[in-house]
Amino acid sequence: MIDALAPLFLLLMVVCAVAALSVKDLLSAVTVFGAFSFFSAAFFVVQDALDVAFTEAAVGAVITTVFFVCAINRTVGRPE
Amino acid sequence: MRSTFGSPVLDAATRLLVPFMWLFAAYVLIHGHDSPGGGFQAGVILAASLILLRLVRGQGSRPNLSSRDAVTCACAGPLLYGGIGVASLLSGGNFLDYGVLPLPMDPVQVRVIGTLGIEAGVMVGVTGVLVLIFDVLAPWDDGTV
């Protein structure tokens, strides 16, 4: 049953990746990329790679999102 | 951050979350033998809690890790890892051969303690590095790193 979910997660990963590339707003792209990381972690769980899934969920979905948002915050031009 | 975006809701949620994140990090570190997890994941969880505190309550929030302490952690972690390796080398074994460490315990227990020691080193190092990366990226008001 749970193995049948693997193609679904892969498909959602592809959808998220394409969406992250095609979206114009950078913050939206980062959010969609977080969703990509989440589906990637779910795919690893289905593949019985719990350790990798754990790391992907912690680093990919949380830490890199925060780092990307900080980096975008630095690139946006401000009047001062 | 230019200004902290703290609100009563965020503040209350942070107060509730952070102790459990620390507890979970400790669990992931100690239980990493028998279940998914280990030093790296525990360090990431600990760093996530510290970054959450910084985001919600600002740079000077307490309890938190200052940037200087983060540098110390980033250096102390690898030092702990390598120190245990060299200590087992000096005790007559191979590098990172914890079983020969001169502790008054069963060799199996010494091995477990040694593994826990290097995992703790990994955790401290990862926490320090991640907090430091965030501090360098975050646009603090006063320009301090």
Image (cartoon, coloured by chain):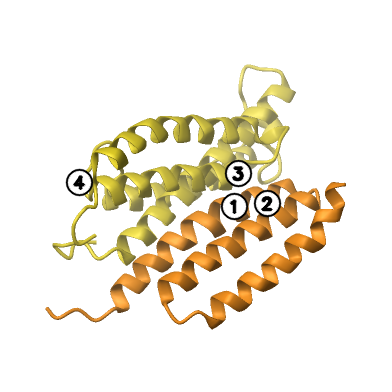
Please give the residue where the numbered disc 2 appears in the rendered image. A53
Residue plotted at (46% across, 62% down):
A65
Residue plotted at (61% across, 57% down):
A38
How many marks can you see?
Answer: 4
Q: Secondary structure at mark 3?
A: helix
What mark, if any, has residue A57 been given in the picture? 1
Give the CA separation, mark 4 to mark 1: 28 Å
Q: Residue B37: x, y in percent?
A: 64, 41
Please give the residue where the numbered disc 3 appears in the rendered image. B85
In the image, residue A20 above or below residue B119: below
Give the CA separation, mark 3 to mark 2: 29 Å
For disc 4, the chain is: B
Type of residue at label 1?
Ala
Q: Residue A21: x, y in percent?
A: 55, 80
What mark, if any, has residue B125 been given in the picture? none
Check if mark 1's residue and mark 3's residue have beta carbons within 8 Å.
no
Give the CA separation, mark 2 to mark 1: 6 Å
What mark, if any, has residue B60 been given in the picture? 4
Q: Secondary structure at mark 4?
A: loop
Residue plotted at (62% across, 55% down):
A56
Q: Secondary structure at mark 1?
A: helix
Check if mark 2's residue and mark 1's residue have beta carbons within 8 Å.
yes
Is residue B138 shown left or right of residue A57?
Answer: left
The answer to whether dots 3 and 4 both sit on one chain is yes
Is residue B138 shown left or right of residue B91?
Answer: left
Chain B, which colour? Answer: yellow
The answer to whether dots 4 and 1 both sit on one chain is no
Please tell me which residue lies in front, A49 or B110.
A49
For disc 1, the chain is: A
